[in-house]
Amino acid sequence: LQNLMRERQTAMQIAWTREFLKYFGTFFGLSAVVLTTGAIKRKNPAVLLPILPLSFVFCYHCDMGYGTLLQRIKGEAEKILDTQSTLLELPKGPLTFKDLEKIRISQSNFFTEK
């Protein structure tokens, strides 16, 4: 059941990215045309500088919506699980029943004292 929910959330994320890409792609295209025209008219190539960060955002969303970004992320996650599992350990180890009881008792004392 959790896997089904994860798949639906991932599908929603991809769909959202594809929808965002339509609007951002239009913005990016218009910006590129306007900035290029401005750079030619003013004879100043510095006017084109905003295209650089916009192109990175555009490429990222293209890769997310239609490319292989999710497969690369999945591969990296599998590599971390296989070779660097110590990074995933909880601080002070896993939660035990004794820890839960301490928390429960301290919280019940907190509410009864007030």
Image: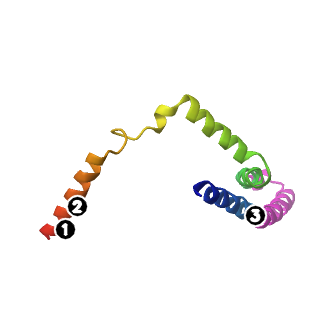
Farthest top residue in view: 83
Q: Position of residue 14 (x, y in %)?
A: 72, 58
**Position above or below: 81 against 16:** above
Q: Which residue is mark 3?
A: 24
**Position above or below: 25 against 72:** below
Q: Which residue is mark 2?
A: 107
Q: Earlier in the sequence, mark 2 or mark 3?
A: 3
Span of residues in magenta: 21-49
Q: Main secondary structure of the magenta part?
A: helix
64, 42: nearer the viewer: 64
**Position above or below: 92 against 105:** above
58, 13: nearer the viewer: 13
Residue at 47% across / 35% down in the picture? 87
Dots 2, 3 in contact, CB < 8 A: no
Residue at 67% across / 38% down in the picture? 75
Q: Which label is found at residue 6?
A: none
The Cα atoms of the two marked residues, 2 and 3, are separated by: 49 Å
Residue type at mark 1? Phe
- Indicate the quadrant where residue 43 lies: bottom right
Residue type at mark 3? Phe
**Magenta segment: does it hold 99?**
no
Q: Position of residue 112 (x, y in %)?
A: 15, 68
Residue type at mark 2? Gln
Q: Which residue is mark 1?
A: 111
> In the structure shown, which secondary structural element does the residue marked by tag 3 occupy?
helix
Q: Position of residue 11 (x, y in %)?
A: 70, 59
Dots 2, 1 in contact, CB < 8 A: yes
- Left or right: residue 107 versus residue 50 is left
Q: Residues within 10 Å of mark 1 (few under 14, many from 20)?
A: few
Dots 1, 3 in contact, CB < 8 A: no
> In the structure shown, which secondary structural element does the residue marked by tag 2 occupy?
helix
